[in-house]
Image (tube, rainbow, N blue to C red):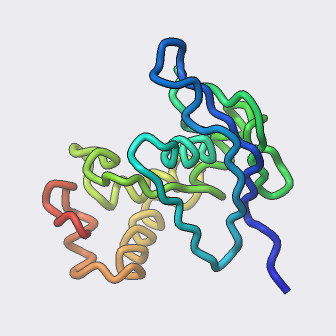
Amino acid sequence: MTAPPAVSIKNLRIALPKGAERPFAVDGVSLDLRPGKIVCVVGESGSGKSMCAHALMGLLPDTVTVTSGEIQFEGRDLLKLDDDGWRDLRGRRLAMIFQEPMTALNPLMRIGDQMAEMFEAHGLLTPRERRAKALSLAREVGLPDPERIVRAYPHQLSGGQ
């Protein structure tokens, strides 16, 4: 028996701003993300892959709008969440690993501090527990010398790290 989808995107349509090269970045995309499964979204540059991911995370730029469709997660249509709903969900139940890590990380903050920041934003753990959790996560993903990694700045890591 197949597990129900963790995320279900149905007929997603994302409009580009007036004057863009085409009216829609995404037009009628539907897909299910099932627990323990991998979904590969393939397409040429500009085909809407990142727009779909950003819509799923509530991170679309102000210049584009979802004109139809739904994104279901835990029985809720994410497209209907307000700012407070997103703040509660993002980072706690949903997260995104950005394509270009060097632009996703703050170059002025240590890696461990950036990892702990999510727990702080959600009022989770004490400062000492956050530091321990960051170190634990670095170990969990198999980074070499996790103690050094969490004290390092982004420019001090290799691209693969």
Instruction: Report the residue that reaches farthest toward the top.
Output: 19
Left or right relative to 66: residue 22: left
Q: Which of 70 and 104 is in front in this view?
A: 70
Query: Residue at 72% of width from left, 28% of height from top?
Result: 67
The quadrant of the image that shows the N terminus is: bottom right
Q: Nearer the viewer, residue 11 or 156?
A: 11
Q: Position of residue 32 (x, y in %)?
A: 72, 62
Left or right relative to 128: residue 158: left
Query: Residue at 60% of width from left, 38% of height from top?
Result: 26
On the image, which quarter does residue 2 sit in? bottom right
Query: Residue at 54% of width from left, 13% of height from top?
Result: 18
Q: Position of residue 85 (x, y in %)?
A: 73, 39
Relative to 122, residue 83 above or below: above
Q: Nearer the viewer, residue 151 or 80?
A: 80
Q: Which of 123 and 21 is in front in this view?
A: 21
Q: Across the whole image, how many numbered discs are drawn on residues?
A: 0
The quadrant of the image that shows the C terminus is: bottom left
Q: Position of residue 88 (x, y in %)?
A: 68, 45
Relative to 131, residue 105 above or below: above
On the image, which quarter does residue 13 sit in? top right
Instruction: Report the residue that reaches farthest toward the bottom.
Output: 1
Instruction: Report the residue that reaches farthest toward the left.
Output: 156
Relative to 139, residue 20 above or below: above
